Image: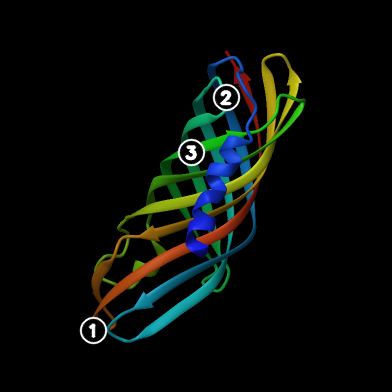
Amino acid sequence: MSYVRYAAVPLLLLACQAGAAEAGYFAGIGLSTSVSGKAEAELENADVTLSEDIDVGALNLFIGHRSVRNNRFIFSYDSISFDLDSSNTSEDATGFRFDWQFVYGEEQVQPYWGLGFGLYNLQDATILNGSNLEGDDMSGISFQMAVGAKIDVADNVELDVSLQRQAIAWQEIEFSGFGRTETIQMSYAYNLLSAGVAFKF
């Protein structure tokens, strides 16, 4: 069956990985900018979906562990800025993300793929302006996937370049404004070009 074949792909990729490498820890910093992105808000009572383009920039501070198979588990602190094109406003979010990266080879350039999730807080959410919740924050959970490459530039230093897809589902909110009560479900989804540097120890 087709879904069995699709489920087997990650297992086949893991089987193709190189053998033993030196385990250890690392820490670093990364920067990201969006190549495309969209914000969507569904107003349940009005049966309306609002959508607009967003530009995203992010600063990422991370620490992690490197396994003997050269795979990585990464814990990160994210600071993200969102520029909403149609609303002509900007928002800031902070949060923590957890990622697993599966790295191949022991050459200077090592390709990888990864996935993870995160927990975020959106400060002073624009969608709440004009309501009884204006100025409140919103919490959200993310899912992200990435493909990229590690580039060794020194014994204990590596560069990381990647293309990431991240989606954040914000909490469902019920608010009063403009003479009615409304329930809203909002999500942001975007593609990021990312670059970073890690120091191994």
Residue 184 x/y as whole percent: 31, 72
| Disc 3 crowd, CA 10 A, few/some/many (<14, 14-19, 20+) | some
Q: How far is mark 2 from mark 1, CA to CA?
A: 57 Å
Give the residue number, with chain letter if any, for mark 1: 180
Q: In the image shown, does 140 or 59 lie closer to the viewer?
A: 140
Q: CA distance from mark 3 to mark 2?
A: 16 Å
Q: Amino acid at mark 1?
A: Arg
N-term mark: 3 or 1: 3
Query: For the view shown, which residue lies furthest in the front direction?
Result: 1
Helix, strand or loop at label 1? It is strand
Find residue 174 and report its horizontal and vertical position in percent.
23, 70
Which residue corresponds to the image point at 55% horizontal and 74% vertical from the top-left?
A: 86
* Disc number lying in front (2 or 1): 2
Three-letter residue code for mark 3: Asp
In the image, residue 26 above or below residue 71: above
Q: Earlier in the sequence, mark 3 or mark 2?
A: 2
Query: Residue 99 has which mark?
Result: 3
**Up-down relation of residue 17 to residue 95 (above or below):** above
**Secondary structure state at the residue bearing disc 2:** loop
Q: Are marks 3 and 2 in contact (CB under 8 Å)?
A: no
Q: Position of residue 125 (x, y in %)?
A: 38, 61
Q: Nearer the viewer, mark 3 or mark 2?
A: 2
Where does the image place residue 70, in percent across and percent down from the top left? Answer: 59, 25
Closer to us: 127 or 158: 158
Give the residue type at disc 2: Arg
173 and 105: which is toward the camera: 105
Q: Is residue 163 above or below residue 24?
A: below
Q: Residue at 49% x, 53% y: name it.
A: 7
Residue bearing mark 2? 69
Q: Secondary structure at mark 3?
A: strand
Is 174 on the left-hand or right-hand side of 128? left
Q: How would you rate the neighbour count of disc 2 (Cα within 10 Å): few for under 14, some for 14-19, many for 20 or more?
A: some
